[in-house]
Amino acid sequence: MQLHVGIDDTDSPEGGCTTYVAALLVERLAKMRCRFLDYPNLLRLNPNAPWKTRGNGSICIRMEAPQGAEADIKKAVIEIVESHAEFQCDNTNPGVVFHLGEIPKELETFHNEVVQTIVHLEDAERLISRYCSSAVAWKNRRGLIGALASIGGTLRGDHTYELLTYRTAPNRGMKRLIDEDSVKRMDSLIPETFNNIDPETNKVLIAPRGPDPVLYGVRGETPESVLAASRLIEVGEPIERWVIFRTNQGTDAHLSRQYRVSELIPRHPSIVTGIFEGRHRIIEGGHVIFTVGDDSGRIDCAAYEPSGSFRDIVTKLTEGDVVKVAGGVRETDVGLTLNLERLEILSLAHKFRLVSPRCPICDGPTESMGRGQGLRCKKCGNKGPGLIKKLVEVPRDLRPGLYLPPPRAERHLTKPLERLGREKQGVPATLLVPWHSD
């Protein structure tokens, strides 16, 4: 019996983690003689969803279960969710969906919609009633959206891996005891991992900052690379358990739809190709605002202060540059703003300035004698008619290409530059041994 279990919305800003629920469930299912068909899938959904908690991640566990075991599996899932979900948080609304058999195309389409747009609970409930064996939801039931989306997120296209380690209960909420030098050594030794260190600040990025149970997570191209990386990371506290997930993190899965400016919709991740207009503005807080236009309209784009050197790239753009901007669309009091996550410079406008010539007689510098009175040599006094200012092209301190914020300012789904050319397809035929703790 092929069974897929989707889970979403068990965490809160104060604690909990849906991946931790998955880790507990993996251990329970292994004891129930289930054979896993894939690593647990960690699907990051639309990062602009208004009701997300932290990383907006949902989980799907795919398995071959013994015949007749569905009821026991369902009971185990419900017990673990009810024991570890953050029900006290108003914005935590867990959902679990069970699906038997192959994944229909309609559920894959639904997953893409949840990653790239905003969908409604009614859409999820309609598809659950048509395609899924059962579902359980708590509170306002919104977790069903992400739970169903995780089932449809089969990750047949590009994907990465993340090994997550978890803390023991007494240490949660305390400072994480991770040896940063060991992380930096790991980063240099295993290039198949990514986003371990921020190159601008030298800051270690593998550990979250909140009170959730995650100790650290290391991301990479293969399960072997993240497992090897974890063995090089030194910590000063016990690791309760660990699991390798297969995920859409680092794939730009949310940035797949090109829009004209007039078609932009609030909270939708969007790509727009247009022309840089006017000048950039720096507003309070150090955020850089600029305008991009196409034949349908104009939109402000924002590069925020935490993006560091990325803002410096934006400030070098000039009128007429052709760019492709990508990010989430936000509704403001004065219209829509695109929160910049990625900038591709397609072509640069030519930039000129007027330059006073050198004197043809003595090669001295020249200067203006006043409005409409021409130039004269400051050295020999020559006022010849050939002394006129000339337009000279100004070299641009910028090149066409793709630019991203530094890793510390990237979203979970953002594809790092080092992943370009590393994209992969397909579902793993076998699973690494071991891929989780006992």
Image: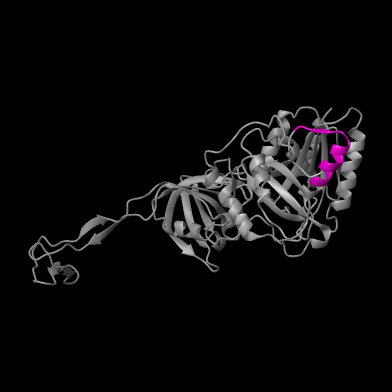
Please provide the residue range marked out in magenta: 23-37
Classify 283 as above or below 193. Answer: below
Where is the N terminus found, in terms of image quarters? top right
Choose between 32 and 322: the one closer to the eye: 32
Whether residue 167 sits left or right of residue 222 in the image: it is: right
* Residue 196 visible in the picture: no
Percent position (x, y) of residue 407?
57, 54
Tell me which corner region of the image, top left, top right, bottom left or bottom right, holds residue 336.
bottom right
Image quadrant in which the C terminus is located: top right
Task: Give me the residue at 47% from left, 50% from top.
Answer: 293
Going by the image, does 236 lie left or right of 286? right
* Residue 265: % across, % down: 61, 47
Number of marks in picture = 0
Residue 414, relative to residue 2: is it above or below?
A: below
Q: Is residue 27 magenta?
A: yes
Residue 317 appears in view: yes
Q: Position of residue 232 (x, y in %)?
A: 65, 51
Instruction: Please tell me whether residue 163 is drawn above or below residue 379 in the rendered image.
Output: above
Residue in view at x 82 percent, y 39 percent = 97
Q: Is residue 246 above or below residue 130?
A: below
Q: Look at the magenta stretch and give its main secondary structure.
A: helix
- Comparing 388 with 380, the one in front is 380
- Whether residue 176 appears in magenta in the rendering, the answer is no
